Amino acid sequence: MTTNALRTQARRAAPPRLTAKRPETAPESGRKAPRKSTLLPGYITHERAGLPLACRVIDMSSSGARLIVVTTERSPASVVEDMPDQISLFLSYDRFSVACIVKWRDEDKIGVNFVSVPRIIEKPPTKVAKPAAKKK
């Protein structure tokens, strides 16, 4: 699958964009750093996954991110439930990869803390888990 096809697939699976931007979450609310809404496409990899899992970065800060798993052949909630605590996140837009610790899980969303310095990756993951077929 080409990079353009992956981007198109991620856009189709993205939640609808809101017209009003969500304000940043201030550090006073218990966060280490303010978050910014992004909706960037990405991929999750870990030792149990045969293929990278497509995701969207809903919002991100300098210390972590909130991700939503794109629907796969399995339900997103079961994928999130089975995900190990240590994962890697690859962001297509910035072409970087960072090691993460999963801090929380909720349905098809996960919250992660970054535990490594982001590193530039020349090639994105080549194969991605197939999205679920649309029901007629």
Image (tube, helix red, strand yellow):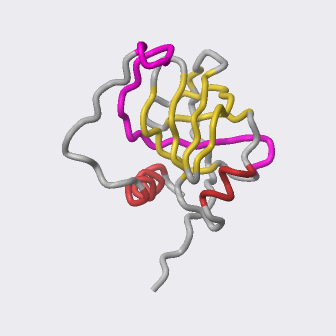
Residue drawn 76% across the image and 41% down it: 84
Q: Is residue 128 above or below residue 116?
A: below
Which residue lies at the image location 44% right of the left edge and 53% below the top edge?
A: 10
Front-lying residue, 11 or 19: 19
Answer whether residue 114 is magenta in the image. no
- Quadrant the N terminus occupies: bottom right
Q: 53 or 120, which is in the foreground?
A: 53
Residue occupying the far front of the picture = 29
Q: What residue lies at 73% left-to-right and 41% top-to-bottom?
A: 46
In the displayed structure image, the side of residue 4 where residue 132 appears, left or right? right
Q: Residue at x 66, y 65 (%)?
A: 74
**Residue 69 appears at what percent x and percent y?**
55, 51
Q: Is residue 55 above or below residue 93?
A: below
| Image position of 44 with respect to 24: above or below | below
Q: Percent from the top left, x then y, of residue 52?
A: 65, 48
- Residue sitting at the far bottom: 136
- Point out the stretch of residues depicted in magenta: 27-49
Judged left or right of residue 25, residue 43 is right
136, above or below 106, in the image: below
Q: Is residue 31 magenta?
A: yes
- Give x and y (percent) for residue 95: 50, 31
Q: Foreground residue, 23 or 126?
A: 23
Which quadrant does the C terminus fall into? bottom left
Q: How many badges with numbers are in the image? A: 0
Q: Which residue is at the far left? A: 19
Relative depth, front residue between 97 and 83: 83
Q: Is 108 on the left-hand or right-hand side of 56? A: right
